[in-house]
Amino acid sequence: MKTTKYLLAALAALVFVGCSSRIDASLPATVKDGTITLKTPARAPGQVHAIGLAADPIDTVRIGFIGLGMRGDDAVRRYSFIEGTKTVALCDLYPDRVSKAQVFLSSKGLPEAAGYDGEDGWKALCERSDVDLVYICTDWKHHTPMAVYAMEHGKHVAIEVPAAMSIKECWALVDACERTRKHCIMLENCVYDFFEATVLEMAKAGLFGEIYHVEGAYIHNLDPFWDEYADNWRLLYNAQFRGDNYPTHGIGPVCQLLDIHRKDLMDYVVSMDTDSFNGKKLAAEKLGTEDFANGDHTVSLIRTQRGKQIEIQHNVYAARPYSRMYQATGTEGFANKYPVKGLAIKGKAITRKQEGLDYDRLDGERFVPKEVYDALMDEYKPSYIREIEQKAREVGGHGGMDFIMDSRLIYCLRNGLPLDMDVYDAAEWSCLTELSRISIENGSAPVKVPDFTRGDWNR
């Protein structure tokens, strides 16, 4: 059976690392005062940074989708509601998924797209001359190779999270983007969730003062979902690698609060995990092995060059409520989303005040009253969300944030604007996967976070 063949191939490819120390040999490292520093590869001659990268406007963005499983199938559906787009190509390892997407396009009165399947169908899609944007929704290990290939063939790319699974892959994305001048955006939808996007606007306006501590996480019991990942690819990855293997939902929104690689830079990370409890049970049940590298709960602490602090957690095994944490502590205020959503802001920090509301008693030590909260959330709601909020909620996709993310991407491409998230965001938010593993496997040693801009962040 096909499923058995792919499962056996995946198992055969695993090299279990257990608790042994390991640093990618292709990235030489130095150790000074207990801190591990990976070597930054030199930028190729003639290659320049991609900060603020903009491309020529595209009137109708022609899209090729690769991966039509859990995320890709819904992306095809969402894009049928976005003006100025055309789905021209579809690809998946399994031909029945391509057929299903074609049926959907037909049901919407849309033209049939070119279809590709099999191991190398994605290459043919990337090579087409009538594709402007390659939208990648495959398993993690294919994200970077597909994105690099697409950029090298003149395509902008949008990659599901995480964009890369190693430091080497992070650099590959950065170099391909800088070299080809094609956009490379990671599809981090959580930065477009209504609370996060609005709090970011408040932070920009100074309501929280100087934000110096932020928290994010991906805590999600995946017990109901493991079997939905074809051939158990996600569980297999966790069986192979320790560390925070899915960091971007937690780290992306809080890095935006600190303006990482714009006004600050992550300096170093220290990570620690628990033993594996539920993870090993899952491996025995679903993979038939006792070998399982990842701990059940991983915590990473990151210090920035400006002396600020980021805490990130990962747990996909625990029987506990979903949480991305999302917390900001500043000199004048505080924002929190999980498990209780609220704002605590000193009244003097609020400059735009709605008539009839009492701001004088706000001291920052307790959440503001509901009427003040509602007024602030409405006042600082981003205009791009306000314009499409109703449609976003109707179309859906994690409550509408997926549709907002896609709409913003297309808006920027059609207007020739820099994207909300660039290739350095993709690399910085994804790199915690390998950096956390390196820290854990070396006794929770500090590991320097690479500067993927190679010094150009503070130009």
Image (tube, rainbow, N blue to C red):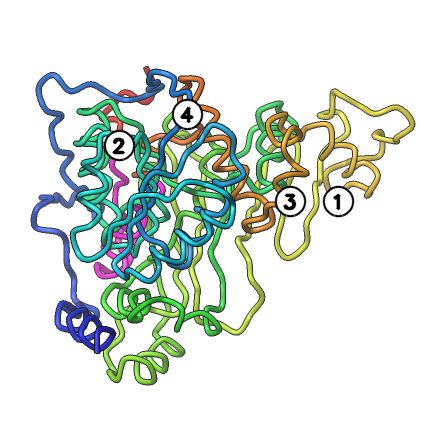
Q: Which mark is residue 367?
A: 1
Which quadrant of the structure image shows residue 236?
Answer: bottom left
Amino acid type of the residue that numbered disc 2 sits on in the rendered structure: Asp
User: How far is the residue under mark 3 from the one under mark 2?
Assistant: 37 Å
Observer-side mark, 3 or 2, equals: 3
Q: Earlier in the sequence, mark 3 or mark 4?
A: 4
Q: Is residue 33 visible?
A: no
* Residue closer to the observer: 274 or 401: 401
User: How far is the residue under mark 1 from the one under mark 3?
Assistant: 27 Å
Q: What residue do we see at 22% from left, 47% from top?
A: 122
Stretch in magenta: 429-452
User: How far is the residue under mark 3 from the one under mark 4?
Assistant: 24 Å
Rendered-image quadrant of the C terminus: top left
Per the image, is 62 magenta?
A: no
Q: Earlier in the sequence, mark 2 or mark 1?
A: 1
User: Pointer 3: what residue?
Assistant: 393
* Residue closer to the observer: 420 or 1: 1
In this picture, is 153 found above or below 344?
A: above
Amino acid type of the residue that numbered disc 1 sits on in the rendered structure: Phe
User: Pointer 2: what residue?
Assistant: 451
- Name the side, left or right, on which 16 lies relative to 89: left
Q: Position of residue 224 (x, y in %)?
A: 48, 73
User: How far is the residue under mark 2 from the one under mark 1?
Assistant: 37 Å
User: Pointer 4: what residue?
Assistant: 60
* Residue closer to the observer: 319 or 285: 285
Amino acid type of the residue that numbered disc 4 sits on in the rendered structure: Thr
Q: Is residue 292 visible?
A: yes
User: How far is the residue under mark 2 from the one under mark 4?
Assistant: 35 Å
- Name the side, left or right, on which 121 lies relative to 246: left
Amino acid type of the residue that numbered disc 3 sits on in the rendered structure: Arg
Q: Residues within 10 Å of mark 1 (few under 14, many from 20)?
A: some
Residue placed furthest toward the right: 356
